Image (spheres, grey):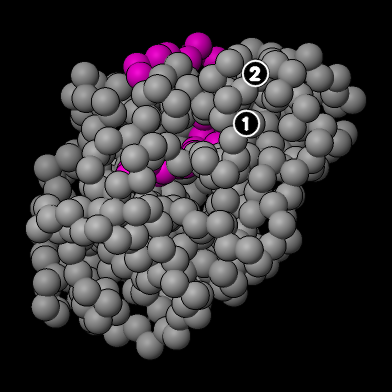
């Protein structure tokens, strides 16, 4: 079974009857015509598996500008699923954006960032053994987020940004339904509103101190979101009632897809939806969003645990499959408690193919949460692999008026 870094929080989904799911019959028919039996079973049971899929077709014009068309299967922003580690992606982008605003203070993404404790349940960070210099930085946290979906790295960026800033900035970019309410560590609602003091240091001298912050952000929580029939609580006691996810993090698959598109294909979205990033920021993100654990020196990982497909669901075979060297997935997955999510921009440099694929599936047959009994290997990972393979093969045979120049996405890995 795939080991989980996200074990302290819970994934969930509920179908709210507020909006009809979007389905393009062309895509639905394509998948069902090509689907092996397992994928066919999933596609025929949307209520059981609560799956959503978004395929983004990309066509380039003569100036190599991308033009995107989305196709959907059961995509529904009103159908809640706990996004888990996928929320780390927008926080990574926001952190680089904030670093750019701090450049006048002599700070960049590699500047040493020390985290103090300023409120109950907060913890400090003064070192990082995964870094080449043994010290923490925004850059190192982002590397770990994309390479292995590290939870502590997310917590530190949450604290650097602050809960109120995170939500205000994402809403300002047009993602009004996003709610980022918590770290991935045991804290109550009030503790999550408080974020730590942060100090930036250069040559052992403090160059900037960011004071602790408190969030006054007013969340618009929906009607109760209750999932499953039972769950195990933090004391490992079985509670014979659904689990409540009303105040958990929330982000729709459509918003995740658009956020990734805004970084991989920035000219294809409205200016106000883009993050304030420069060419070096994009190069940095393209490398670590696509790099595999064995290709990284700092941080360095045990590849028996963090295998190639650890954070790559689409296309990879379930388990420890490999991709050809000429195929790269620039993505962010999330997983735990029956839900698997992946949002990916996939490139085949050999055949000049590019497309986006975003999906979520729920595999929790016994409807008990926190019992670590999920059908990840049997159903979840094969769902992504088989759907991804069908779309990739369609893309290989698709005629393009203009051959895309994808050189901007090529990276030198360690």
Looking at the image, residue 397 sits to the left or right of residue 289; the answer is right
Front one among 365 and 333: 365
Looking at the image, residue 293 sits to the left or right of residue 164; the answer is left
Image height check: is 414 above or below 117? above
Q: Position of residue 299 (x, y in %)?
A: 23, 35
Element at label 2: loop
Label disc, if present, on residue 344 of the rendered structure: none
- The question of residue 371 being in magenta is answered with no
Q: Residue at x 50, y 57 (%)?
A: 14
Element at label 1: helix
- Which is the main secondary structure of the residues drawn in magenta? strand
- Magenta-tinted stretch: 319-345
Residue where numbered disc 2 is placed: 35
Image height check: is 187 above or below 47? below
Q: Position of residue 70 (x, y in %)?
A: 75, 43
Q: Position of residue 41 (x, y in %)?
A: 58, 25
Image height check: is 143 above or below 170? above
- The question of residue 322 being in magenta is answered with yes
Say whether marks 2 and 1 touch (CB < 8 Å).
Answer: yes
Q: Position of residue 161 (x, y in %)?
A: 36, 70
Image height check: is 355 above or below 124? above
Q: Residue at x 74, y 18 (%)?
A: 33
Residue where numbered disc 1 is placed: 43
Q: Which residue is drawn at 24% across and 39% down?
A: 372
Q: Do we see residue 284 in this rendering?
A: no
């Amino acid at each position: 079974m795939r080991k989980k870094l996200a074990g302290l929080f819970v994934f969930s989904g509920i179908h709210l009857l507020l909006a009809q799911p979007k389905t393009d019959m062309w895509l639905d028919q394509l998948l069902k015509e090509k689907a092996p039996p397992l994928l066919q079973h999933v596609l025929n049971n949307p209520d059981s598996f609560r799956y959503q899929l978004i395929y983004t077709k990309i066509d380039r014009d003569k100036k190599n500008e991308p033009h995107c068309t989305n196709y959907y299967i059961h995509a529904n922003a009103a159908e809640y699923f706990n996004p888990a580690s996928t929320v780390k992606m927008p926080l990574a982008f926001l952190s680089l954006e904030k670093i750019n605003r701090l450049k006048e203070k002599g700070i960049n993404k590699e500047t040493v960032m020390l985290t103090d404790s300023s409120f109950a349940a907060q913890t400090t960070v003064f070192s990082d053994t995964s870094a080449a210099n043994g010290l923490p930085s925004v850059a190192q946290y982002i590397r770990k987020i994309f390479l292995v979906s590290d939870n502590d790295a997310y917590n530190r960026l949450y604290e650097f940004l602050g809960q109120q800033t995170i939500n205000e900035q994402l809403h300002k970019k047009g993602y009004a339904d996003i709610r980022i309410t918590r770290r991935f560590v045991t804290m109550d609602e009030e503790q999550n509103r408080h974020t730590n003091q942060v100090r930036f240091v250069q040559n052992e001298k403090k160059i900037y101190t960011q004071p602790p912050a408190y969030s006054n952000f007013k969340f618009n929580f929906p009607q109760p979101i209750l999932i499953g029939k039972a769950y195990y609580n933090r004391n490992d006691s079985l509670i014979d009632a659904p689990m409540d996810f009303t105040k958990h993090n929330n982000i729709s698959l459509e918003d995740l897809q658009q956020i990734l598109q805004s970084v991989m294909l920035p000219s294809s979205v409205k200016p106000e939806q883009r993050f304030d990033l420069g060419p070096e920021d994009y190069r940095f993100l393209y490398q670590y969003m696509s790099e595999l654990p064995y290709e990284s020196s700092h941080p360095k990982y045990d590849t028996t645990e963090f295998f190639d497909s650890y954070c790559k669901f689409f296309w990879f075979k379930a388990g420890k499959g490999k991709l050809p060297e000429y195929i790269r997935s620039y993505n962010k997955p999330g997983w735990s408690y029956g839900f698997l999510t992946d949002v990916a921009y996939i490139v085949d440099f050999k055949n000049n193919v590019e497309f986006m694929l975003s999906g979520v599936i729920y595999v929790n047959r016994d409807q008990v949460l926190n019992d670590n009994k999920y059908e990840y290997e049997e159903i979840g990972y094969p769902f992504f692999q088989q759907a991804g393979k069908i779309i990739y093969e369609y893309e290989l045979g698709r005629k393009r008026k203009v051959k895309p120049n994808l050189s901007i996405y090529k990276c030198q890995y360690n």
